[in-house]
Amino acid sequence: MSRTHVSTILNGVETDFLCEPRQSLLEVLRDEIGLTGAKEGCNNGNCGACAVHLDGRVVNACCVLAVETQGRTVDTIESLAHGDQLHPLQDAFLQEAALQCGICTPGFIMSAKALLDQEPNPDEQRIRFWLSGNLCRCTGYDKIIRAVQRAAAEMQEAK
Amino acid sequence: MDSFTYLAPRSLGEALTALGNGKQSLLLAGGTDIIVQLREGRRHCDQLIDLKHIPELMAYRITDDGVLEIGASAPLARLYEDPEIRRRFPALVDCASIIGGIAIQSRATLGGNLCNASPAADSSPALMALGARVVIASSNGTREIPVEELFAGPGRNTLQPGEILLRVRIPAPAPNSGAFYHRFIPRNEMDIAVASSGVALALDDSGVITAARVALGAVAATPILVPAAASALVGKPANAESFAAAGEAAAAAASPIEDMRGGIAQRRHLAKVLTVRALEGALNRIRESR
């Protein structure tokens, strides 16, 4: 099967890659480009571990074909920190101990970032609703919710 | 996943030409069902035709007559974020905002949810209650059918080879009318309906029901309209008694199966309870809009 040439803006950088039409964005990010932050959990759109942003909206990278990203903007968890400077959400997840095994964490953070980009001050119910597409099987959700609330407060303060 | 070629036509004409080239095709809108089905070997194709580069399939608009026309590939999130849609078509927001989670709604579409033809699809009963129709294109032109005629069975729609679902048309709500959709699931969000009900009601000035539509999801091989429930409502006052009668009619019309999500008696009971509560929700919307 011939491979297709795709040009995207990946984490702010013009990026070209070759892929087969059947390859998901998740496969290409992890196996071709080497960005392993987005995780493969269920590979069917249920767990949210592979959440990335496509043109600023959160999507499951397992449910996007890499060829569909031609000419579009893709942002992954790798775009959040600047050197040693963590994004407030990353920092808040550490402060609130909102992770144990960490497999779900990149997805939670990318989903939460999409929420805070759109609604800087969501209430708890809104956060829980928004994150319902992200599953965590070890930490439990309360710490994750608290981390998002903490990050929201810090990001508001920093403005 | 089997190999296939990927096509991204820029116009409906190009898409129809590709669809007629003799290869086995599948159509791609949001991909949240079809990509998973291809990966799991539940569907196969030689070519996948992406419908997201055809401007008319990505657009939606409210016409001068108040009809909401939604391109088959427009993502759900764009619909429910629109303040005019929220104000005029809240029952559409009811279903669009609970199909999967946010990451699904960024991509998933009404066209895809309908054509995937799950008996438990959330958009189907809501759109049936709203009296929606779908416009279907082929190389012979277009045809329009009520949305309920799109469903043939679990995972099977009535589109013919060479046809593309273009858009959904939701009529302008009548004055003094309201609609409501909801479902039962064991968690709060992000699940597939055990059973669901979509209803629409119109009242005259004295509060008597002049028109009603009741639709159910996940209680039969396809989403179903329940004309007997509508008959139990029309000409009656909008009150607990008429709503209870409609609920009984809904339960009688349900022919559910037992599966991992629920049992037969449970689903039949849910058909009743959900219908009564949906009618209460529709009535509340009528009152709030006065």
Image: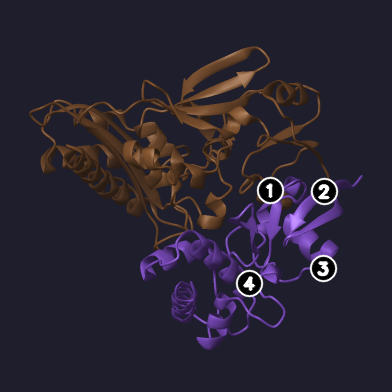
Q: Nearer the viewer, residue B235 or B31?
A: B31
Dot placed on the residue nearer the N-terminal end, 3 or 4 = 3
The residue to which callout 4 is attached is: A106
Q: Distance from label 2 to label 3 (Cα)? A: 16 Å
Q: Position of residue B48 (x, y in %)?
A: 75, 37
The residue to which callout 3 is attached is: A34
Q: Residue at x 75, y 46 (%)?
A: A71
Farthest right residue in view: A2
Q: Nearer the viewer, mark 1 or mark 3?
A: 3
Q: Amino acid at mark 4?
A: Pro
Chain of the residue under label 4:
A
Q: Tag 4: Cα neighbours inside 10 Å, few (<14), some, or many (≥20)?
A: many
Q: Nearer the viewer, residue B74 or A92?
A: A92
Going by the image, does B189 lie left or right of B212? right
The residue to which callout 1 is attached is: B35
Chain of the residue under label 1:
B
Indicate the secondary structure of the residue bearing disc 1: helix
Please tell me whether residue B80 is drawn above or below residue A101 in the rendered image.
above
Q: Tag 3: Cα neighbours inside 10 Å, few (<14), some, or many (≥20)?
A: few
The residue to which callout 2 is attached is: A6
Q: Position of residue A94 (x, y in %)?
A: 57, 85
Q: Which of the 4 quarters of the picture holds residue B123?
A: top left
